[in-house]
Image: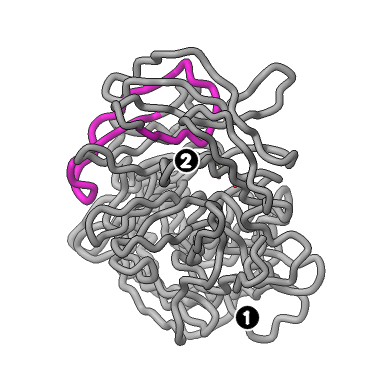
Amino acid sequence: MNSEFVPATRPILPGFHPDPSVCRVGDTYWMVCSSFEYAPGVPLFRSDDLITWEQAGNVLARPSQLDVKGSAPSGGIYAPTLRHHDGRFWMITTNWSDRQGQILTWTDDPAGEWADPVRLPEVKGIDPDLAWDADGTCYLTFSGWVEGGTSRIVQQVIDPSTGAILSGQTELWSGTGGKWPEAPHLYRIGDFWYLLIAEGGTERGHAVTIARGPSPSGPFTPCPDNPLLTARGTDRAAQSTGHADLVRRPDGSWAIVYHGTRPRGATPEWHVLGRETFASNVAWAGGWPELTTPIEPTGAAAVTIDELGDTLPPSWAGASRFAGEVLRRTAQGWCLAGPAFTGRRHQHHDVRVTATIDARHGTGGLEIRIDPRHRLTIEVNGSGVRAVAQIGDLVSTLGRADVADPGSVHVELRATTESTFTGPDQLVAVVVGGVELGRMDGRYLSTEVAGGFTGRMIGVRADSGELGVTAFTYHGSTSSDGPL
Ligand code: 6LW
């Protein structure tokens, strides 16, 4: 690894945005991330400078493109690849839950509609990548399973417009010996084909390694300076860094995006916002890339976003159901048909979310969760309100209050890094008038406790009937977080 490397401390896409894949067309960068059981799937972002991103939509935005009804937490959509080839955008990913292999779709306008995908059910593996050689042959490179149950980086030639498989499976370079070789991306740069992969598993041992060869299928020679990136054994703010993708700027310089976590609190530390996307500048030395300086936002970040206006924002997603299938616009606001959870990513270490709930026709309320079994919920019903914490099998009522008007109950959830002694944050449930119903140590809503690949979501849960939501505002701030 390059000794001049200055690690990034702030993400370019904070919160649960793992497995980034990026491409550039003209002056615009486009990036996608994994979405797991949440729908719409594969959130799509746009930037002019690689630092500030706005969500332009979702690639898998319709039920005809994505079925997550059977997705358990951390099932569904795994790592996507986004590429631009011959005037067209291509996205390929895996739906882990439907056992139908890879999902491949395209569009001429990434912020518009994407085609109903072709499926590649015979391709067994995850983290598919697309690359084309000069004669137009399309190489699908992915992390496949071979005899003995281990994963290897493998490749097949395909026709991307039909999904037809045109060759057998070839085994490529699978890294330097770390577990789970995955996340391959293949690039033609100068005289070589470069194979960039992740290995070591997505936890603290995560790493990015690289090899190069004379053809898209190799043979590949590993970089003598591998790993290109890893945070293992360091005290960097961004840990578990891996799963990278390279992109070239219009001026010919290079950058890399990758994901990592920001664990906090006393040893052994907990991370609560999932795997977030970071970026660095890249220089070339001796025909190999090396990471140099961070690409990151500067200055304090504070945002206030009113989420549920007239239209559903692209950041709003449902667990195992499309948000748009369970949320309905009403004269007063929105209505969620239970049982369901919909929400947005928890993106700042310090947040305050306020909502107004109408529980006359349903029960449910405001919830922060890392999965359905690790959550803090303010539940409202016709007669009162209570805060409920769930940590796996343990479910506990933290506090209750009466409500004067079940048609309009103001509730608030906070995550705060103030006065935390050992954990990453404190979660606080508040009901109308500032009455604190209860609080819990945020480490119980962390990946270290819950497991899985996602991060925290904050949103609305309906248990039964139709729950009204007439306001939902997300306030996020901290000086150490990136912008939205
Ligand atoms: C993804 C793999 C990974 O498919 O985690 O960290 C898996 N990397 O590449 C789920 O995001």
Decide: is 171 above or below 33: above
> Would residue 457 be counted in the magenta stretch?
no
Between residue 342 and residue 160, name the one nearer to us: 160
Toward which corner of the image does residue 162 lie, by quadrant?
top left
Q: Which residue is mark 2?
A: 192
Q: Which residues are magenta?
A: 103-132
Residue 220 position within the rendered picture, expressed as x and y whole percent measured from the top left: 59, 34
Cα separation between marks 1 and 2: 47 Å
Residue 20 position within the rendered picture, expressed as x and y whole percent measured from the top left: 46, 52
Q: Quadrant of ligand 1?
A: top right
Q: Residue at x 35, y 71 (%)?
A: 52
Q: Quadrant of the N terminus?
A: bottom right
**Label 2 beta carbon within 8 A of ligand 1:** no
Between residue 130 and residue 336, name the one nearer to us: 130
Say which element carries label 2: strand
Toward which corner of the image does residue 172 lie, by quadrant?
top right
Q: Which residue is mark 1?
A: 417
> Would residue 107 be counted in the magenta stretch?
yes
Toward which corner of the image does residue 313 lie, by quadrant?
bottom left
Colouring mode (rainbow / by chain / secondary structure / one colour): one colour
How crowded pointer 2 is (Cα within 10 Å; few <14, some 14-19, many 20+) is rated as some
Q: Would residue 367 be seen by someone viewing this image from the given angle?
A: no
Residue 303 - label: none
Horizontal side of residue 135 vs 237, given as left or right: left
Residue 390 position within the rendered picture, expressed as x and y whole percent measured from the top left: 66, 56
How crowded pointer 1 is (Cα within 10 Å; few <14, some 14-19, many 20+) is rated as some
Say which element carries label 1: loop
